[in-house]
Image (cartoon, helix red, strand yellow):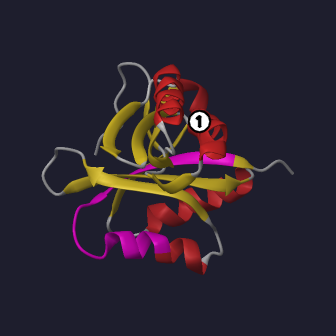
Amino acid sequence: MMTDNHIISIIVEHKPGVLYEVSNMFRRRNFNIESITVGSIGKEGLARMTITVRGDEDTVEQVTKQLHKLVDVVKVAKLDPERSVVREMALVKVHVANSNVRSDVIQYANIFRGNVIDVSPDSLMIEITGDSEKINAFIQLIQAFGIKEIARTGITALQRGGKAFRA
């Protein structure tokens, strides 16, 4: 039985309590949410949830069936990662002991197409976007300098091509 990360895109009513309702369904069914992002889709009263769940195909099928049953869920789709644009964003605050370290961290950020978004006498804050593997590689690379803080958004994704997932 193979377990992978699966991306589920959900259009929901954009109102209080919906996130609780969806996450509570996962809790009741003993499914774990690996990551979740939520945001307005530009259509009045609707939002998109992008949820990453680890499991086999049967688990993901159960998740999608249970999501369809929720009142505030308008539409559910499992995204094919090979045919989707998948991104995550991270803010990483790195300790910089001196100007040489500062220069090295800035060079690494540039290589990973990250942006320096905050500078203080003893730290730099880097914004980096991409797939999870890219962000993990950047974090691993700069760990030797001393990471002060990390904040990650979780995965957000859209299917490639002209076809749109709409309510």
Query: Residue at 62% across / 66% down in the picture?
Result: 32
The one of 129 and 110 positioned closer to us in this rendering:
110
Q: In the rendered view, tell whether residue 134 sits above or below residue 156.
A: above
**Residue visible at 48% across and 45% down?**
155
Magenta region, residue range: 5-23
Q: Is residue 95 above or below residue 62?
A: above
The picture places residue 115, in percent across and down from the top left corner, at 37, 31
Is 133 left or right of 51, judged from the image as shown? right
The mark total stands at 1
Q: Is residue 30 above or below residue 85?
A: below
The single residue placed furthest to the bottom in the displayed view is: 28
Q: Is residue 86 visible?
A: no
Q: Is residue 3 left or right of residue 152?
A: right
Q: Position of residue 120 (x, y in %)?
A: 33, 47
Name the foreground residue: 114 vs 154: 114
Task: Check the image and name the residue furthest to the right.
Answer: 1
What residue is at 51 percent from the left and 74 percent from the top?
Answer: 25
Tell me if residue 85 is in the magenta stretch: no
Identity of the residue drawn at 54% across and 34% down: 131
Using the rendered view, name the quadrant where residue 125 is placed.
Answer: top left
* Label 1 SS: helix
Left or right: 43, with 133 as reference point: left
Q: Which residue is mark 1?
A: 138
Mark 1 Cα shell of 10 Å, populated few (<14), some (14-19), many (≥20): some
**Does 15 lie within the magenta span?**
yes
Q: Residue flagged by tag 1: what amino acid is it?
A: Phe
Q: Position of residue 143 (x, y in %)?
A: 64, 45
